[in-house]
Amino acid sequence: MPVRLSVPRESASGERRVALDPSTVSRFSQMGVSVQVEKSAGDAARFPDGAYGDAQLLDTAELYRQTDIMVRVAPPTVEEIGSLPEGATLVGFFHAHRTPEVVAALKERRILSFAMELIPRISRAQSMDALSSQAAVAGYKAALMGADLSCRFFPMLTTAAGTIRPSKVIVIGAGVAGLQAIATARRLGAMVEAYDVRSATKEQVESLGAKFLDLGVKAEGEGGYARELTEDEKRRQQEALAGFIAKADVLITTAAIPGRPAPQLVPAAMVEGMKAGAVIVDLAAEGGGNCELTRPGETVEHGSVIVHGPLNIPSQVALHASEMYAKNLLNFLTPTLKDGEFAPDWDDEVIAKSCLTRDGGIVHGPTREAIEGDAS
């Protein structure tokens, strides 16, 4: 009997994405997999039920009851995990450090779970890297948010009423989100400057037509991420940044460290030094924010500066974000599916390192230590 791959309707508040789009469902079907989609699962992402021609449409209870492998976007609820057959497989984002109750439920139900955020950042796994695909969406949208909230034009305009100078946009963090924000702001005609503690990003920033700000603070870390700065480095970084940020019309911050609160780079005093009408778009709001004044999920004004703390930005571009995420899932699961059967290779680094729970235990070391206090 072929493995049954299920796609539920997302239950997280405000989540509009769906784990698989119709074209990816078709690809799985061609591999001998029986794909089941919950009725209306793709509606919010603008994929109607009729588009899923190769899938079986089921109601909620039947979908969960008949699942071998379930793919989803946002972490499930404890109740949803309880509806899965014991020993089923679950693939998606879990953010285990924020949802210990979900990990406990996975362990209790002996669910084999793979966390898309744990996929190692190696060359072979780039096509599976959902963090990067969704960060690209967020970076693109951040530039549009900045332009929308700003009281100034982004491009230079020459009009009968005179010439209007282009806006200055500063992007902090030149990862996937930051680079996409730079590219989008440049396309909109803004002058863009960017900073990252990883000096290796200088060439990437400049290739997009932006100016790289060298503040003399470097912090290369493992896996393409930045390491956490020392207190002295933080102080020197903020002192050097203050002068540049004071001249910015829009500041986009993207600095994040997986599994930890976002580093606070922009204190209130720095915001108070910004020009009237300036805008801060804090992409790190879900981790607490890079700005001291950020309120996750809210847009606030501090003096004459707007501080925007958006959450779950990829959901705002639901159709394309879903298509990108679905391809990540397809590329991750394809090596595990042989003749319609699920057979993961535990000697594969990608499979082993992305596994969160297995056989009733937490196999991801940092999560196990955080939740059980036992790294052994």
Image: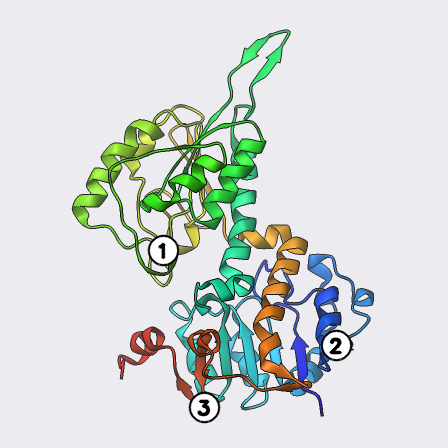
Residue 303 in the image: x percent, y percent? 37, 29
Tell me the quarter of the image containing the N terminus.
bottom right
Question: Which mark is in front, 2 or 3?
Answer: 2
**Few, some or many C-alpha atoms within 10 Å of disc 1 (few <14, some 14-19, many ≥20)?**
some
Residue under circle 2? 29
Residue under circle 3? 359
**Few, some or many C-alpha atoms within 10 Å of disc 3 (few <14, some 14-19, many ≥20)?**
some
Specify the quadrant of the image occupied by residue 242: top left
Q: Is residue 298 visible?
A: no
Q: Secondary structure at mark 2?
A: helix
- Contact? badges 3 and 1 (CB < 8 Å): no
Q: Is residue 122 above or below residue 271?
A: below
Pick whichever of labels 1 and 2 is earlier in the sequence.
2
Q: Which mark is residue 325?
A: none
Q: Is residue 14 above or below residue 362?
A: above
- Contact? badges 2 and 3 (CB < 8 Å): no
Q: Secondary structure at mark 3?
A: loop
Tag 1: residue type? Tyr
Residue displayed at 29% across by 27% down: 243
Instruction: Quote the CA–CA distance across marks 2 and 3.
Output: 28 Å
Q: Is residue 232 above or below residue 247?
A: below
Residue displayed at 30% across by 52% down: 220
Q: Is residue 89 left or right of residue 225?
A: right
Q: Secondary structure at mark 1?
A: loop
Tag 3: residue type? Asp
Residue 167 in the image: x percent, y percent? 49, 24
Q: Is residue 351 left or right of residue 274?
A: right
